Amino acid sequence: MPDFWSHQIAAKKAYALYVPFKNSTLFFEGDLLKDYYFGAQGPDFYYYINQKKPFSKRHYSALGTYFHLHGVYKTLRMLVKHALTSNLPSVRAYVAGYLTHYVLDAECHPQICAHAPSSRAHKVYELALDALCVKHYEHVSIHTMTITAYKDHTTEYLEDLWRPILTSLSLESTILSKDFLSAYGDMLTVQEVLRSDLIGKNPWIQNFSKLFKYDLSQLMYPRHFTENELKMLQFDDFNDHFIRGIERSAIMLKKFEALYIKDLSTEAFLEWLVTSDYLGEPIKDGGKHYDF
């Protein structure tokens, strides 16, 4: 998938499709919507932690990448199990959002990876698609979007969700409790930098950062697209996948609800859900026995 706003838009539209046939089980409003939209960022939150502190040694981008490629079935299974046993509505909302992230990534990434195979080109392409998604669905420039509605929120449940997963996958991690607590705020800070075009307007900051091997060039949304650039970006092709991802996410929410009323088993839900990693690469047996 592209980036922050595309996942937020997709999660919002998937929930709108789900609402007409919902009961109260997955009814999100107020702060629960913040948890749902935070979950919709999937494992990307690992990329954001301490990014506002370039000299910090506690950066966890490697974990963000790991969870897109490995331990997919096991991670999703643990998150679903936690949601089913938790008494916290915020956990239920977060996991529901998280599952939309997986669905959208698995649907959209094959087209993105084919168009931009290198990691740097991949990110640049995602940011461009994010800007185009906002223009297409919100009818405004991405630089006018605001994060105000998502501020003033705590996600204390995040460590309880993720620490067991890290341990289960034998991932040696020095991630601190305060890093989990700061993840939500750090995510919003990065979005504010992107929205404000701080780096684009002040190229000296980017040049200065390179002295410390901290490349800020990926913290910029494009402002304008030429006709040729629009053709090269193949937004229409991407949008076909985006729409399919939204529709599948809405179905997923209905099936997720069925877990709570015991109309569907966890195993049946995961068998339907998990067919690939986040890049759309097939996993043998859905990763049930082979994805560690």
Image (cartoon, helix red, strand yellow):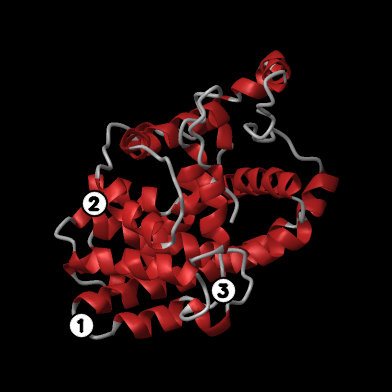
Q: How far apart in space, not on screen, are marks 3 and 1 (Cα)?
A: 25 Å
Q: Nearer the viewer, mark 3 or mark 2?
A: 3
In the picture as drawn, the residue positioned furthest to the left comes out as: 87
| Type of the residue with mark 2 | Glu
Q: Nearer the viewer, mark 3 or mark 1?
A: 3
Could you say which disc has been placed on residue 66 in the image?
none
- At 44% from the left and 69% from the top, the residue drawn is 249
Question: On screen, 227 above or below 274?
Answer: above
In x, y percent, where is residue 106? 57, 67
Could you say which disc has been placed on residue 276 in the image?
3
Q: How far apart in space, not on screen, are marks 3 and 2 (Cα)?
A: 31 Å
Reading the chain from its start, which is encountered first: label 1 or label 2?
2
Q: On the image, numbered disc 2 is attached to which residue?
A: 29
Reading the chain from its start, which is encountered first: label 3 or label 2?
2
Q: On the image, numbered disc 1 is attached to which residue?
A: 262
Q: Element at badge 3?
A: loop
Determine crowd level at label 3: few under 14, some 14-19, many 20+ residues with C-alpha closer than 10 A: many
Determine crowd level at label 1: few under 14, some 14-19, many 20+ residues with C-alpha closer than 10 A: few
In x, y percent, where is residue 121? 75, 46
In the rendered image, the quadrant that contains the N terminus is: bottom right
In x, y percent, where is residue 72? 49, 67
